[in-house]
Every structure is written in structure tokens, then in C-alpha cells.
Image (cartoon, coloured by chain):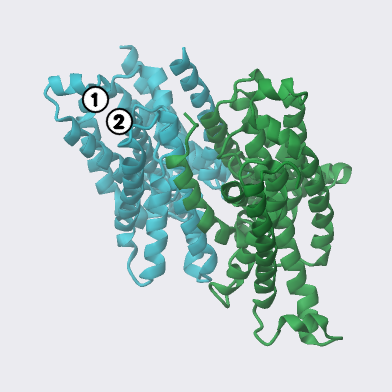
Chain colours: A cyan, B green
Amino acid sequence: MRLSVLFALLVLGLTLSAVWSLSAGAVPISWQVIANTLFDLEGPKQEFIILKSRLPRTLLAMLTGGSLALSGAIVQALLRNPLASPKIIGINSGAALGVCLMVLVLPGVSIAWLPAAAVIGGVAAALVIYLGADLRGASPVRLALVGIAVGFVFDAGVDFILVTSTDAQFSTPLIWLTGSLWARGWTHLNLVWPWLTVLAVMAMLLSYWLDLIRLGETAATGLGLRVRFARLVLLSLAVFLAALSVSVVGVLGFVGLMAPHIARSLVGGSHKVMLPCAMLVGMWLVVLADAAGRAIAPPVEVSAGVLTAMLGAPFFVYVMIRAGRATRV
Amino acid sequence: MIGISSARGSAVGVAVPLLVFACGICAYASLATGGRIDVAVWDLFRESGTGTSVMRDIRTPRTLVALCVGVNLGLAGLILQAVTRNPLASPAILGINQGAALGLTLGLVIPSLTSVLGLKAMSISGAFLAGLVSFTIAGGLRGRLDGLRLVLGGVAVGAFSYAMVRFAFTLEDDIARQVLRWTIGNITDVRMAAVREIAGWSVAGFLATMLLAHRLNLMALGEAQATGLGADPRITLLGGAIIAACLTGTAVAVAGPIAFVGLVVPHICRLIFGADHRVLVPATALLGAALMMAADAASKWLTAPIEIPVGVVVAMIGAPYFLYQTLFARGLD
């Protein structure tokens, strides 16, 4: 009972934020006009701005926020590391480098291939971390550090590409680099939503694997789970979710870190409930960040990624200190 | 040098002249590269002409700034690594670089603050505050400095400051590309005025670090021993932090937050010269200067005719080295 109330509240909050996101920006739009436009009612409408620009943007914010949150929840459970998230373990930067390299090396290629490039980059980063730290049994904090370093390496590559190319095509990646939904439309949404939806459903269906893995390797094996296989599948899910999100909205940091923690404190650790909750929280975070970025100083836009980093970096410190206490005592 | 064993002494005797020589070569490379091929270094010593003014007004200031920034960041890294006893400590990784950038940005965005303190003071206090926050997060104030948490906390402080910088600039104006170039570290457009701003700080910082060198050596023995030998570690820490903040703050004010110099240079020097800070301080200053001048030359020559910010060149070397360190450094967990 309590759970259904909580989920209803989350959905309600998300809806309200989405309405705010539709109304905020260089041209403020009242909620009556939004309702008129969306449900094709009588009265004044703003079809162009809402249907062509803000609606796809808001939907994309939900989609990527949910995906990053799921990815973060999976990574945290797999590595049993509260500090892990797609950004912290370098997957986001890897995906970003993949996209930049593709734009640089194959300038003529259609943007339909961007997600593929992002996935390749994300997998490369995940491999470095997996081979370098996880296999050697590094401590959680050490693993986070290695991930950050991998992120630095990929970021250096991205910076190099961005500053050496004078092409106009790189002015977009520049904004995109900090994670922004600026100028994202239906094309970008159509590019990723089928994949992300399938991946999200798979993550939900496999959530009990995460619960089993949390019990420890021997217990999970005893309960009939092929642990290595399960870990590989889940890690791929996490990498794909994060990399595909990055391919359309750029490096939105810290969403994958914050959302699972908030969800866990709301509904506890059982992944069957936690994953949907984390997804909703992630959606909410990104929709809010995007809307706030437009509302702070119109017509100037603050990148959503800047706002999530301003929230997320202190949050990271908080989690780190709390995790340190838990292991020390 | 006093108190160095003879074997180490002979190594120093060979290596220091070599370092000076390397500095000379790097300075020449930095002076000789640039957009115009018809300008040569000996134009510097002519009476007048286009070549001479290019050399005097554009290339020389740039090389000198690279030199000073290299000295500053190298020394700051050396001090931080000594006082925290953490091999990964350095201005960029503890968030001090980004803190300085944030101080500077606040100074630019809020003019009333600048009129009271001046831009350089803003940058230095930003650097100091960021370092203090990272240190506090790692439990330094309670006397239990946790190595990994120092680094991770520093990265978080850095990420936060960087986000704030970007936030302030997007609100101010649509100058994304310049901001990006500056936030990576760029010395393309420096003139003689910039050299005058930083050179004094570099010299003073070098002398102050030399005075601190003995205390840094005692720090390596452990806090108890250092106290026993009459050097209160808290004073070493505070003095070192102030010097490092001044060195970093002035470097960032001129060139932007250039990462990884402060990490790599002290490591290489320790590899060659051992652990005595009385040798390490001059060696780090020389090698830092050489590295930055070489990076400046590379930034002009690698992708000519486009120049890349020198910070990118350094990051391409420094980031993989940092990754290597995080994988294999001992004494962290």
C-alpha cells in the first residue's frame, strides 16, 4: 500500500515537472495553452514550440534520465560499490570519445550511427576498468579512482578533438559535451527510444539476478545462477544504457550516482522495486535540471549537465564519507 | 648540496647540468616554433624588423610564461605530495586548480569583489579554499588523512568548481569556446604583462619552497618523528599549503588550470634524484619549466597551422600516466 502511494507521488511529481519543462524557456507558456496544444482543445495554442521543440526534449530528458539511473543502479549492485556510476567509472567519457572520433574520422556519416560509436567507446572504457581493477580485486574506492582516471584519459582525447577541429560541426558537440538537451528533437528521440525501452524492460526482468548477486557469489551459484554469465549480461546492459544516453544528450554526470541512492533510501534494496523507483527518480532529476536550466536566465540556457554536476559532486562526497564510516566500523 | 651521499652526489652532478641543458633546448624549441616560419630565434638580437617584434612581443613572453607556469605547478605538486604523503596529490587532482579557476571566475563575474581583493587574490584564495575542503573531506582536520578519500574528494571538489565556472560563464555570455579553451589551460595570447604578473611569484615561491625543503624531508619520516625533531607537522602543512595555493593561484590566473604537470614532474624527479627535497626542489623547478616549454612547442607544432591549448598537450601525456598510477601505486588503500 505504502509503495503504491509512493510511486503515485513520484509519477505525479514527474508529471508536474514535465509540465514545468514544457512551459519554461525563452517564451514562457501558460499551462492552459499547454493543455490546449497537447489535447487539441479549443483556445490559444503554441503548436510549433511545444510539439517541435519542448515535447521531444522533455521526453528525451525522461528517457535518458531513466536509463542513466538504471545503469547506475546496476553498476552499483554489480561492483557492490556505492560510489560507482556510469560517469564515475568512465563509461560516459568513453562514449563521448567514441562519438567525437566518429564525427572526426567519418564526417559524412549519418547521425544514425552515433549510438553505435557511443556504445563502442563505452565498452572500451568498461573493459579497461574491468581488466585493470575489478579482476585484481581492487577495493571499492580504488575502483572508483581507476574509473575516474580512465575518464580523464578519454576526456583528454575529447578535448584534443574539440580544440583542434575548427569545423562548425563541432560547435554542437561542444555544448553536448557537458550534457545538454539543447536543440534535441524528434530525430534524436527516434534514434534511441526503441533500444532504451527494450534495455530498460530487460533490466527490470532481470532485476532478481541483481538481488541474487548481492547475496554473494557462492550463495548465488547455490541458488542456480550462472554468476559469470549474469554479471556479463548485466554489465553489458548498464554500458549500453549509459552509452546510448550519452550518444544523444552528452555527458550528464552524477544522475546515475544520485538516483539509485535516493531510490534505495525510499524503497529499500530489493531491486524488483528499487529499479523502477530509481528510474522514476532519474527521469525526474533530468527533467528538473533541464527545465531549471531554461528557467534560470532566459533566453540563455544553462546546460542540464552543469546543474547535475553542481548537485552531484557534493552528493558524491556525502556517499563517500558515509561508505567510509560503514566499512570502518 | 650538503648532506648527500657521494654516489647520489655524482648522479646529481651529472643530472643537474643535463636538466639545465634540457631547459635550454626546450626554450629554443618553444621560441623557434610558431605561425610564421620566416622568423628565427636570432631575430631576437637584431635591432628592429618584423621578425624581431614577433620574437620580442609574442614568442618570448609565451615561452617565459610557460617556464614560470611549469615552475609553479611542479613545485606546488611537490609540496602537496610531501605534506599529504600521497603520491597522487597534485593541484589538479585535489581540486586546487579548479578552485583557483572558480575564484578567478567569481572575480570576473562580481566586479565589486575584485575591486576589494584584486583578481590574483581571488584566484589564490579559491585555490586555498578548495584545497582546504578536499583536506577536510579526507579527514585531515581530525588527524587521519585517508589517501584515497583525499584524491576522490579532490576530484569531487574539482568537478563542482568546474561546474560552477561553466555555470557562471554561460549566464554571463555565450562564449563557450573561449571558456573551453581557457578551462583547459591556454597561453596562446599572453604578452609581456602576463610575464610581469607571474615571474615574481615564481621566484618567491621557489625561494620559499627551498626554505621549506628541510621540513618536507622531516615530514616524510612521519608526524611523530617530525615533531620529535622540532618541526611541528602542522606548521609544515600550513606553510606548504599557503605556498602551494599562491603558486597554483598565480599560474591559473595567467594560463588557466593546466592539469597533471604537478603530478608528473615531481614523480620523475623523485625517480632520478631520490627523496631529498633540498635536491628535489631545484630539480622539479627545472624539469617543470622544461616540460611546459616543450609542451608549448608541441602545441604550436603538432597540428600547425592550428594551435592547440597547451593544457591539452599536457593532458594527453598526464592522463594516461595518472591512470597508470591509480592502477599500480602502492600505499593508497
Q: In the rendered image, which residue does mark 2 sit on? A: A78
The image shows residue B10 at horizontal and vertical percentages of: 65, 53
How far from the left and from the top, in percent, is residue B4? 69, 43
Q: Residues within 10 Å of mark 2 (few under 14, many from 20)?
A: many
**Which residue appears farthest toward the left when viewing the image?**
A224
Residue at x-position 21% and y-position 25%: A208
Asked whether the residues under the numbered discs 1 and 2 touch, taking CB atoms below 8 Å apart as contact, a structural biologist would say yes
Q: Position of residue A111 (x, y in %)?
A: 34, 63
Residue A77 is at least partly visible in this image: yes
Q: Chain of mark 1?
A: A
Q: Give residue A278's mark.
A: none
Q: Nearer the viewer, residue A49 or B316?
A: B316
Q: Residues within 10 Å of mark 1 (few under 14, many from 20)?
A: many
Residue A146 placement: quadrant: top left
- Of mark 1 and mark 2, the one earlier in the sequence is 2
Circles 1 and 2 on the same chain? yes
Q: Position of residue B206 (x, y in %)?
A: 78, 48
In the rendered view, does B215 fall on the left or right side of A158? right
Q: Is residue B225 above or below residue B3?
A: above
Q: Which residue does the numbered mark 1 point to in the structure image?
A: A213
Q: Nearer the viewer, residue A235 or A33?
A: A235
Mark 1 lies on a secondary structure that is helix
Type of residue at label 1? Ile
